[in-house]
Amino acid sequence: MVGRKHSQTPPRLNHKMTQATAITTTQRAERIAQLHRARSKSWFLRISLVIIAALVLWSWSAGELYQSYLTPAQKQANLERFLNRMTPLPVRDTGDWSLALPWVGKQLGEGKGIEASIRTFSLATVAAALSGLCALALLPGAARNLATSEPLGMTSGYRKVSRPLWYMGNKITRALFVFTRSLPEYVLGFLLISIFGPDPWALVLALAIHNFGILGRLGAEVIENAPQEPAQTVMVHGGGRLGAYLAALLPESFNRMVVYFFYRWETCVREATVLGMLGVISLGYLVVAAKSGRAFDQMVFFVLLGGAIVLIGDLISGLVRRLLRFERK
Amino acid sequence: MTASLRQRFLGSRRGTLLGIGIAAAICAWLLGLDPRRLVEGNSLKLAGEFLAAAFRPALDYESPVDGAPPFLLVAVQSVLITLRFALLAMTVAVPCAIILTFFSTTAWWPNRSVPLWLKAALRGTYIVTRAVIAFARSIHELIWGLLFITAVGLSSEAGVIAVAIPFSGILAKIYAEMLEEHARDSQEALEAIGAGSFPAFVFGLVPRALPDLVSYTFYRLECALRTAAVFGFIGIETIGYRIKLASDEFHYREIWTYLYLLFAAIALIEWWGASIRKRLRD
C-alpha cells in the first residue's frame, strides 16, 4: 500500500512526456516498472503496519471490556424513559411548545446556565494564560538551539563543564513537557481536588499543567524553526541566550505562538465544560446534577449549551488565528 | 479599516500580551480565584506528600490484601485495557472520519462545468456533513458517555461509541483542513494530463498529504489513550479506575506508578508516530 502511494510522482512523468514528444508503449511500461522499483521499501513502515493490524485484531477479539449486566429489555426501558423525559417539562405536561422559550430562560437564569457558561470560559482563559506564561519562561531551556553550550551554533570559551550541564537541562525540560502533557486534565483535576478541595484552583491548575506541556513543546518547535540570523546578531554583539531569546527569537515567532495559544484556549474551553463534573460549578456540574435528579430535559439542555459554548470558542479562536495568519504574509 | 484594526490590536505584541493578561485577570476575578486558598489548611502538606511520592512510586500495594493479584500485574493489565479501549474507539472513529472527510471537502469536486443539480447536491451534502461534524465534536466525549449511560446504561459498546463520535468529528475536521491546505501541484498535474478530478484527488493529493494525516491520527490515538484513562472514572476498568481507587485510600505512591505507566504508553505511541512520519516523508 505504501509502495503504491510512493510510485505516484506525476510532475516527473509530465516532464518526461514534454521532452519526448512520442512515447512508445514499451517505454511507458519500462518507466512504470522503474517507478515501481523506486518505491519506498522501509521495513519500519511495513512492520508498523503489521503491528497496527495485530493490535486492532487483538483489541476486537479479546473479549468484553466491561461486563454489562443489563438485559436488552432493561436497556429498552431505560431508553424509552430517557426519550420520554427529554422534552422540556412544561411542554411535556401541556403539549404546547410555546412554553419552551420561558423554560429555556429559566434554565439560563435560575438554573445557573449563564453563570456556568461564564465560569467555563473563565476557567479556560486563566488556565491558558497561566500555562502560556510558564511555557514561555521555560522555552529557553527547552529549545535545542538555545539550550546547548554552543547557542545558535556559536562557540565561546571553555565548555567542558557547561556542555553536559546544558545537555541535561535541555533533556529534563523536555521530559517535563512530555510528562505533563501525558496527564489527562480530568485525572489531574480529580487528584488536585483531593489535595486542594473543591476550589476553582484545582480545575485551573489541572488545565494549566496539561497545556503547559503542549504549549512548551509547540513553542520549542517554533523557536527552533524561527530565523536564526537576528538572534545570532544579538549574540555577536555581546548578548546572552536570554537577550537573543527576548530580543530576537520571541518577537520573530510571536504570531505563531499566539496562534498556538488560541488553539490551546479553544481546547481548554472544550475540556472546561466537563471538568465541572468533578464538583465545581461549570457546565459539567449542571449536567451531572440534572442527571442525578433525573431531570433529563435539563440534562439535554445543558449538554447542548455546552456544545454551543465549544462552538463559540472555536469561532473566536478561528477568527483570531485567521487574522494572525494574514498578518504573517 | 480592518487592516488598521488588526494592526492596532493584534499587530502590536505589547497590546496582545496586555489583552490576554487583562482578560485572564478579569476571568480570575469572576471565578473568585484567591491565591491564599492554595496555602490554606493542610493543602500544602498534602501537596508536599503527593509530590514526594513521585520519587518513590509503589512496586507493591501500600496496604496489601491477601489473595489480591500482584500489584504490578494489575497495573500493567489496566494499561492494556486502556490501550484496548483507545484502539477500539479509534478503529471506529477513523473509518467514520474518512467518510465524513470525503463529503466535507471540496478538494475532489469536479472543476469542469457540471449540471446544476449535481452542483446543488454536492453543496447540500457538504453543508449537512459540516453541520454533523460540528455537532459531533462540540460535545465532549465524557458528556457523550454520560448521555449513553443515562439513556441505555453502561456497556463496552456505549463507551466506545461515546468516544468515537466526537473523535470522528475532530479527525474529519482536521483531515479536511489538511487536504484543503496542502499543495495541489501533483493533483493539478494529473488533471492536466487528462485524469478525472476524482482520480486526481485520490492519487495526486491524498498520498502527498498522507504523512500529515497519519501523524495527526497518531496524535489522536494518544488523546484516545488519555480519554480511555478518564473513562475509568465512569466505570470502565481502565487505568483511571485504578487511580480513583488508589486516591480514595490516599495511596499516593500507587497513583504515581499508574501515572508513570500511562506516561510510558503515551510516550511510546508518540515516538512511534514521529518515526512513521519521518519515514513516510522520505
Image (spheres, rainbow, N blue to C red):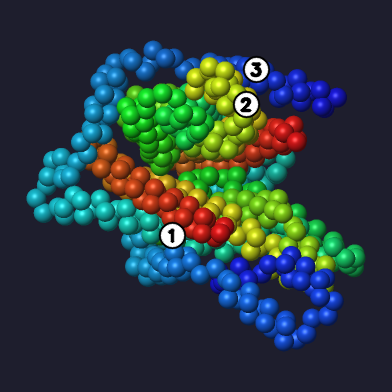
Chain letter of disc 3 in the image: B
Q: Disc 1 marks which residue?
A: B87
Q: Inspect the image, locate mark 3, and give the three-letter code of the amino acid beneath it.
A: Arg
Chain letter of disc 2 in the image: A
Q: Which of marks 1 and 2 is in front?
A: 2
Q: Kindly indicate the quadrant of the structure image that contains residue A50.
A: bottom left
Which sits in the foreground, A135 or B88? A135
Numbered label attached to residue B232: none
Horizontally, is A20 left or right of A35 in the view?
right
Residue B264, horizontal then vertical, whole percent: 34, 48
Q: Decide: marks 2, 3 in contact (CB < 8 A)?
A: no
Numbered label attached to residue B14: 3
Q: Inspect the image, locate mark 1, and give the three-letter code of the amino acid beneath it.
A: Leu
Q: Which residue is drawn at 57% across and 27% down?
A: A232
Q: Inspect the image, locate mark 2, and give the three-letter code of the amino acid beneath it.
A: Pro
Q: Is mark 1 on a helix, strand or loop?
A: helix
Q: Which of marks 3 and 1 is nearer the N terminus?
A: 3
The residues bearing labels 1 and 2 have C-alpha atoms spaced at a distance of: 46 Å
The residues bearing labels 3 and 1 have C-alpha atoms spaced at a distance of: 45 Å
Numbered label attached to residue A230: 2
Q: In this view, does A72 lie above or below B236?
A: below
Have a look at marks 1 and 2 and say if they share a chain: no
Q: Decide: marks 1, 2 in contact (CB < 8 A)?
A: no
